[in-house]
Image (cartoon, helix red, strand yellow):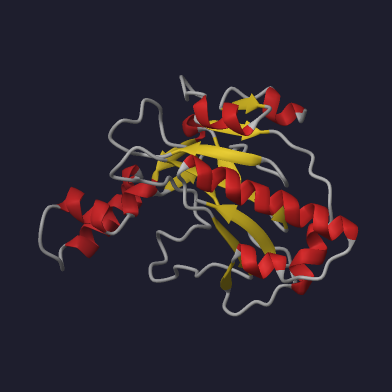
Amino acid sequence: MDHQFSDNSQIGIVSSFSDLVISHFKGEMNALCWNRNLEGDFKEIVSQLQLKDNITEVSAEDLLALTLSEKGDIARQTILNDLQLLSDFGASPSLNLLKNYERDDEFDFISTDVYSFHVDRSPIGTDTFLCTYYGAASDIIPNHQVTQKILIPEIREKLKELHQDSEGDFETFLTEYFFDLHYEPHHGAKPLNLGLGHLWRLAVDHPEQKVLPCVHRAPAENDGEYRLLLIC
């Protein structure tokens, strides 16, 4: 087991998919990890897939059409099994080949893209599942090590100036444009990298949620390297 996960009060460690989906978030714990050391050659799969856009969704049929070595096939079976487990659970998993996400550079004082630390929000009770099979992996950060960006005085003032040109309540404006979902790490904050091969379940902001939502971000991609990511 990876000790950086086991010694962290934000993370619960499980050893099976069934434990991953039935365990409850509680206290500071808003991330659950099915800790795995996957076998197989995921790089071989990535090298054979065709990137059509910066983000290309890969279907089970796309995976099955690849001609792979024995190690490549082990990796393929792992991904197909994960897709099946999540689908049977009632989730809608998506396997993405990623060059990069779109950057939000509209404002110089606040970013609302996925490279910024943020939480996911849903109107219904749900969770975010993700697993990075290849490439750079996502980060999470403890809630006490971040401040909501809309509460930082200089950012809030600039948002108020921006709001003057639109109608409606200021707080509604912040929600409608997703400014309230983004967070600024404190000086000396210690993000945790989610690593490769582990299947994660992260707490989402929704009406029935009993814990704080998990603050996370997409990583800067490694030069010349695609990511292979399962997410739902």
The residue at the point 73 percent across, 49 percent down is 78
Residue farthest left in this picture = 168
In this rendering, the count of numbered labels is 0
Drawn side of residue 214 relative to residue 198, left or right: left
Residue at the (48%, 23%) spot, across then down: 24
Q: Position of residue 180 (x, y in %)?
A: 32, 48
Q: Position of residue 11 (x, y in %)?
A: 59, 28
Considering depth in this image, is 164 or 65 the residue closer to the camera? 65
Left/right placement of residue 141 relative to residue 26 reads: right
* Picture layout, residue 188 above or below residue 62: above
User: Relative to residue 49, is residue 157 depicted above or below?
Assistant: above
Residue 176, above or below 47: above
Residue 218 seen in the current view: no
Left or right: 135 in relation to 95: right
Q: Residue furthest top?
A: 27
Residue closest to the eye, 11 or 152: 11
Residue at the image point whose x is 67% and y is 60% from the top:
228
Does residue 199 appear anywhere in the picture? yes
Residue at 54% x, 67% y is: 101
Residue furthest bottom as drawn: 52
Query: Quick one: 204 or 66, which is closer to the camera?
Result: 66
* x and y percentages locating residue 144 in the rendered image: 48, 30
As drawn, is 130 to the left or to the right of 67? left
Residue 215 spot, x, y in % from top left: 48, 41
- The quarter holding residue 18 reads top right
Quarter the N terminus occupies: top right
Work out whether residue 198 or residue 102 is closer to the camera in this orientation and state it.
198
